[in-house]
Image: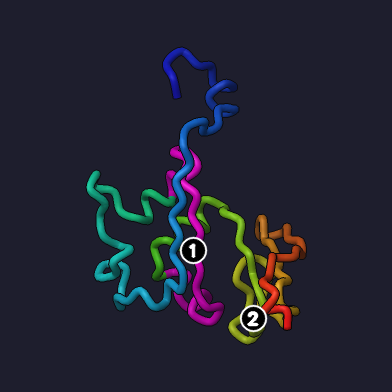
Amino acid sequence: PAAGLSLEESLAHTWSGPRVFLVIDDAERVGGSSPYDSPLGGSASNGMTTAQLVSAAADVGLQVLYTRSFGSFTSAGGRDPIISAMMQANAPLLLMDSNPDPGAIIGKFRGHSMSAGRGLLILSAESGRYCQVATTEEEGK
């Protein structure tokens, strides 16, 4: 924050610069058996890891879209540094059609069967709501 801001002004300040999007699709396919040998666990040119960048996302205009299969999400929660950083930042989670067997992922929320394009947007361990995600004409057939 700029010098001279009061505590209230600092807390109310939101990012006003450009927004950068980081999209990681099918993260379970990226490779690496541990966070240390994963391409996502390495350091950026400024010395920060991808997980550290994710932790600071809201402060620097970074929007992160991170997808992985549900089964691998529940088993990777503690080992994946990006999932850990997103969970610590209380990032919203969109849960799509999935198997309930792996158990709860956040609070009381667990996977379950949903029709195409339906998702459960989880905002916190206690708060979630169903939403419709756009589908293509082909997916709807």
Given the image, on which type of amino acid does mark 2 rest?
Ser
Q: In the rendered image, which quarter contains the N terminus?
A: top left
- 92 displayed left or right of 74: right
Expressed as whole percent of the image width and height from the top left, the position of residue 11 reads 56, 28
Expressed as whole percent of the image width and height from the top left, the position of residue 16 reads 52, 30
Sequence-wise, the earlier of marks 1 and 2 is 1
**Mark 1 surroundings: few (<14), some (14-19) or many (≥20) residues within 10 A:** some
Q: How is the image coloured?
A: rainbow
Quadrant of residue 131 within the rendered picture? bottom right
At 48% from the left and 54% from the top, the residue drawn is: 64
Q: In the rendering, which numbered label is found on residue 98?
A: 2
Q: In the rendering, which numbered label is found on residue 66?
A: 1
Q: Is residue 128 above or below residue 30?
A: above
Q: Is residue 115 above or below residue 120?
A: below
Q: Which residues are magenta?
A: 55-78
> In the image, is residue 5 part of the stretch drawn in magenta?
no
Q: Secondary structure at mark 2?
A: loop
Given the image, on which type of amino acid does mark 1 rest?
Tyr
Spatial separation of the CA atoms under disc 1 and disc 2: 16 Å
- 53 displayed left or right of 45: right
